[in-house]
Image (cartoon, coloured by chain):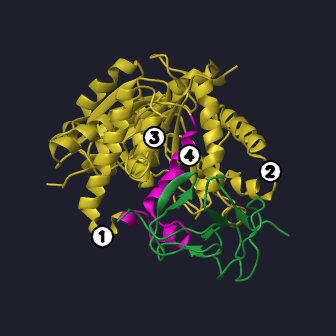
Amino acid sequence: MGFMGYKRPDGKCGVRNHVMVLSSVSCANGVVNAIGREVPEVKAITHPEGCGRGIADVEMTSRTVAGLCKNPNVAAVLIIGLGCEFMKAPQVADQIEGSGKPVESLVIQEQGGTKKTTAKGAEIARSMMAEADSLEREECGWDKLVLGLECGGSDALSGVTANPLVGVAADWLVEQGGTVILSETTEMIGTEDILSRRAASSGIGEKVYGLIKDHRKFVKDALGPFASMVISPGNVEGGLSNITEKSLGCIIKGGTSPVTEVIDYGAEPSARGLVIMDTPGSDVFSLTGMAAGGAQIMIFTTGRGSPVGFPIVPVVKVASNSEMFRMMEDDMDVNAGRLLEGLSIRDAGDDLVALLKRVAEGEQPKAEINRQDCLSIHTVGPAF
Amino acid sequence: METNAVLVDPKDNVAVAIKEIKAGEAIVGIGGVEVRANEDIMRNHKVAIAEVAENAPVRKYGETIGYASKLVRPGDWVHAHNMKWEED
């Protein structure tokens, strides 16, 4: 038994059927937004990247943008470029051609400006919408699901209730042959020994160790005496004393499976099972990287209360405590605080898996209902 | 008595308060050990349930989360003021 999803030409399965209009460079954002106003059903996505960056960022942005286009939740893509940018729209289109999904690009300087590009873009978007609407859900195996995991606005209970609960669902999906992405390298600091011991091979273990160790050094160099506090003041007030404590509570949401791969930001996993993606701890950057890696659903645990979602991927919110769940009920889907009120983690785990299946088949979690469409591409260097 | 703390792993020497615990109140929910709070413990903060010598590991999730920067007695609040991130 799997879930009813949208089968894509490349064999992947979407849980949503979005038409995405995306800028290749920030200079095209105005046109993307204009097309979004003309055709409100499309996902009009803007970002501040695409030009004026160093080599490492060009590679990362290009991989991320192409990955978002290839995400199985996206049925068709229209890319809007300016013309003189580094990351050109037709080049992005070429990168995703292999996915077999409808892709088109428009260049503002070639079309003759804003109004003409918007009119033509709206026409293309409408025709893509009509084609996407003709697709129907079909039976897909759980091995096709990539589940991204995130925690944000953590408190001391995130690691006690919400994250262990998500760990149960992560273990379940890995057992079904699916893929789970554990992200946020910053929040693995201090757990390098534990995670590398859990690797599927010694080579992967070394990669895990190296990734976290290098990041630990990076954080120390960048933050100096504040390195132990790479957690927000809200985390500290919430009872977490340092990053190791927060990290242990963070990685527990990946469950107990062996780590099968370590991948770069925005890259697609080639292995199934529990995969580590190198993303920053900052939530929206991390969600964007996992969505670019092909995650069709993401689970986001929070203690202080984060309403954040993602434009093309449903994000399931798990509250670590009942008080915040009630306070922010419009943003929360699951109350893991019930684990402190007598609910067993086994029953709560079954409920979460059942919810995942409903979300995979179209039920909208709160962040999707609220259109909490947050997206930010991670960068490492300066802008020029 | 109502549960007011959670011990995440049996190997831990700190528990997490799930409600505010006043000085003198018993820590309930840590499985048999009798400990009273030496000071007010804020909700979600850590309370020691065993003595932790200076420089000895503070354990949560069954793992070391830091080291006592001074002697920690059972019932003490444990946070940045008496726990350091790395060994000296």
Q: Which numbered marker is on residue A252?
A: 4
Chain that appears green = B
Q: Is residue B84 magenta?
A: no
> What residue is disc 2 on?
A343
The answer to whether A185 is drawn above or below residue A237 in the figure is: above
Q: Please give the chain letter of the residue carrying mark 2.
A: A
Q: Residues within 10 Å of mark 2 (few under 14, many from 20)?
A: few
| CB atoms of marks 4 and 1 within 8 Å | no
> What residue is disc 1 on?
A225
Q: Which numbered marker is on residue B77?
A: none
Query: Mark 3: which amino acid?
Result: Leu
Upstream in the sequence, badge 3 or badge 1?
3
| CB atoms of marks 3 and 4 within 8 Å | no
Upstream in the sequence, badge 4 or badge 1?
1
CA separation in Å, label 3 and label 4? 10 Å
Answer with the quarter of the image where residue B84 lies. Answer: bottom left
In this structure image, what is the colour of chain A?
A: yellow
* Residue A350 shows up from this direction: yes
Q: Residues within 10 Å of mark 4 (few under 14, many from 20)?
A: many
Q: Which residues are magenta?
A: A228-256
Quadrant of the snapshot with the N terminus of chain A: top right
Tag 4 secondary structure? helix
> What residue is disc 3 on?
A195
Q: Residue at x 59, y 51 (%)?
A: A367
CA separation in Å, label 3 and label 1? 25 Å
Upstream in the sequence, badge 1 or badge 2?
1
